[in-house]
Image (spheres, rainbow, N blue to C red):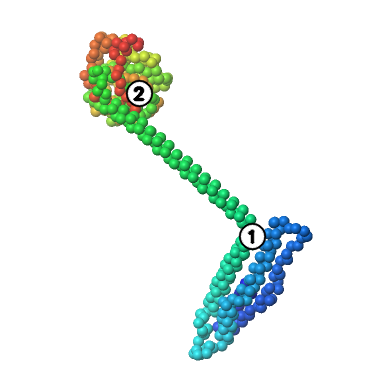
Amino acid sequence: MLALLAAGVALAVAAGAQDGLSPGSRFVCTALPPEAARAGCPLPAMPMQGGALSPEEELRAAVLQLRETVVQQKETLGAQREAIRELTGKLARCEGLAGGKAPGRAAGKDTMGDLPRDPSHVVEQLSRSLQTLKDRLESLEHQLRVNVSNAALPSDFREMLQRRLAELERQLLHKVAELEDEKSLLHNETSAHRQKTESALNALLQRVTELERGNSAFKTPDAFKVSLPLRTNYLYGKIKKTLPELFAFTVCLWLRSSASPGIGTPFSYAVPGQANEIVLIEWGNNPIELLINDKVAQLPLFVSDGKWHHICVTWTTRDGMWEAFQDGEKLGTGENLAPWHPIKPGGVLILGQEQDTVGGRFDATQAFVGELSQFNIWDRVLRAQEIVNIANCSTNMPGNIIPWVDNNVDVFGGASKWPVETCEERLLDL
């Protein structure tokens, strides 16, 4: 190995000299004797102590002896390397060919036998050969060192290492088994939970579908209510029919809400170009308001006590006259509410939400929370006595434009339809 290193130094010197040589120049490759290289690498001395040695000191002494053995074997291997002799022969031939003409070759040809013509290629090829030999030698030395070290370890120490490795392997396998068991249990629990959740969701979806399609168990087509239990922007009811052009109307409904502040929007009617064509809303701390064509009238109604109340509002385009009734009693009247403006046809009627566009863009803060029933619309202003008769349950008069019937009302987003209390039961709640 040391001889190889010495030869490498000589090659490096030769490679450095090639940069300044002109064609036909002479270069010399000189190998140093192995004795000159070994003179500067004395072997480490063995530590000597009096008395008995501890196990660690014995191991250290054994390691030092092994090192000495390895060094000696390295010297032996280095002295007997056939590859180094071949390399020395190539270097000698390189020196001879660089100074003159090769026999058997034509004059003027710059050839070097079987070597490349470019001197830099010669140096590169020799460097690669040297590196290959060095790598092979280091591999042999490493294998020898490992074999000798294993042989030099005490048998009880090797057994202890083997037991320790076996124990670590058993612990590792046990931990892997535990992790696999936990993974299996977690997978089973997740699957069971997922199946349970999916079953509950399917049941809920089926119930919602049934409610959206309408409940045929109602005693009469109008004996139902729409429940909107949460203040959200996705619970609402929708009237399937739309309004024709109107020059007057009356809207009546039963409602129950204890929401605060404000009951929200019991109903809204939007048409293209006007989202607030007809709106009944109580928002925040404001009083209940009736909007016609985005014009506002405040109504003296108070219904946020958690009880059933019967509400009616009338309006006519002539002078924009309006009236407000609660539980059959007229509590307010006024005029100039969108006078001479006919109600536009073809819009969308929504229960429980205020529309910012036709049929959509609901605001949760304006949503109605509670229950609605008996929502009817007429195309005329009802007389006060007719409204009283409807409110005290003496007359059942469905709207001639929008009647309250089961198949005319769809519910969405978790809103539901339920059987409603009788009119007499609602009166007892007042």
Residue under label 2 = 228
In the image, residue 149 lies at what x, y percent? 62, 62
Binning the other alpha carbons within 10 Å of mark 1 as few (below 14), some (14 to 19) or many (20 upward) gives few
Closer to us: 48 or 299: 48
Q: Quadrant of residue 289?
A: top left
Type of the residue with mark 1: Leu
Expressed as whole percent of the image width and height from the top left, the position of residue 387 reads 27, 12
**In the image shown, does 200 or 120 lie closer to the viewer?**
200
Q: Using the numbered discs, state the Cα–Cα distance from disc 2 to disc 1 in whole angstroms.
A: 84 Å
User: What's the residue type where badge 2 is placed?
Assistant: Leu
Name which of mark 2 and mark 1 comes first in the sequence. Answer: 1
Residue 74 visible to an observer of this rendering: yes
Query: Residue at horizontal 57%, vertical 84%?
Result: 93
Q: SS of the residue at dot 1?
A: loop
Q: Position of residue 38 (x, y in %)?
A: 68, 73
Q: Nearer the viewer, mark 2 or mark 1?
A: 1
Residue that mark 1 sits on: 153
